[in-house]
């Protein structure tokens, strides 16, 4: 069990009278890329927010890097990087100043600032304030901020939304590089080609329940599909049909 970095057992999350997560359980292993998939409203962002100590679980057991959520969140926050879906950054700071802030916050080396600017192709906008940048560039700054320091696990919630195809492929290479350094990646995405290319394993949420945890290849084989997107759509259709027949 020493290689388990995230452990979730029977996790529930309720908002007033709505049950968003309904008893999900899974583990994530050190050094893997683990992608959480599902339709809008399935509970993906809620799961990320609980694991990254933004939300408290209603009930269930959650451990990240061996520490309990929410009781030991102070220790967890020191060792994780987070790219939220609604990342906006500090709008009146420049790109460089935003990245410098997070590098200092996570005790990274000063040289990491220029490394991240180069890595995310931000050189030509590094002295511009965030409020004047396109959404795609803001996403890049968010990714750079998540990579600051030397975190053991990165939680990336739909990080490539708004990126052009070239930038998205560049992001894939960065993710692979981080994995090669031993960093664990917890990714949510609506891009099924992204999940197929990057993931060691994928988990599929539907209606707050965890439907499947497997490799992309195994899911494709199960549905006799040549790509993960076709297999995923077939699975979601079967779940919708089952609901309609109840």
Image (cartoon, grey):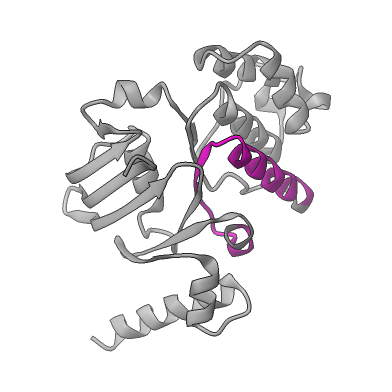
Q: Quadrant of the N terminus?
A: top left
Magenta stretch holds residue 110: no
**Percent x, y of residue 161:** 61, 49
Q: Nearer the viewer, residue 90 or 204?
A: 204
Instruction: Judge by depth and name the residue closer to the eye, 195 or 22.
Output: 195
Q: Is residue 68 above or below residue 235?
A: above
Classify 81 as above or below 75: below
Q: Residue at x 62, y 12 (%)?
A: 109
The residue lying at 54 percent from left, 59 percent from top is 190
Q: Is residue 205 visible?
A: yes
When asked about the image quadrant of residue 51, the answer is: top left
What x and y, as percent, mark residue 182?
Answer: 55, 36
- Asked whether 176 falls inside the magenta stretch, the response is yes
Quadrant for the C terminus in the image: bottom left
Give the residue displayed 49% in from the left and 73% down from the top: 219
Residue 78 vs 166, above or below: the answer is: above
Q: Residue furthest right?
A: 124
Q: Specify the segment rendered in magenta.
A: 166-194
Report the side of 194 relative to 117 (left or right): left
């Amino acid at each position: 069990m020493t290689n388990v970095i995230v452990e979730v057992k029977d996790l529930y999350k309720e908002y007033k009278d709505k049950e968003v997560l309904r008893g999900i359980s899974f583990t994530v292993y050190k050094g893997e890329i683990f992608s959480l998939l599902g339709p809008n409203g399935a509970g993906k962002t809620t799961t990320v927010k609980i694991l990254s100590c933004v939300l408290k679980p209603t009930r269930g057991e959650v451990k990240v890097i061996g520490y309990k959520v929410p009781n030991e969140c102070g220790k967890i926050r020191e060792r994780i990087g987070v790219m939220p879906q609604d990342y906006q950054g500090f709008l009146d700071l420049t790109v460089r100043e935003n990245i410098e802030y997070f590098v200092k916050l996570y005790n990274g080396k000063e040289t990491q600032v220029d490394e991240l600017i180069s890595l995310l192709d931000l050189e030509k906008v590094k002295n511009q304030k965030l409020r004047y940048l396109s959404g795609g560039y803001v996403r890049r700054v968010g990714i750079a901020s998540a990579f600051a320091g030397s975190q053991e696990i990165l939680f990336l919630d739909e990080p490539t939304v708004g990126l052009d195809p070239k930038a998205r492929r560049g992001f894939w290479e960065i993710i692979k590089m981080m994995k090669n350094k031993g960093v664990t990646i917890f990714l949510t995405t609506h891009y099924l080609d992204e999940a197929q290319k990057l993931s060691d394993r994928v988990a599929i949420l539907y209606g707050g329940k965890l439907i499947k945890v497997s490799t992309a290849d195994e899911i494709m084989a199960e549905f006799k599909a040549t790509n993960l997107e076709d297999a995923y759509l077939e699975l979601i259709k079967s779940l919708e049909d089952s609901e309609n027949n109840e």
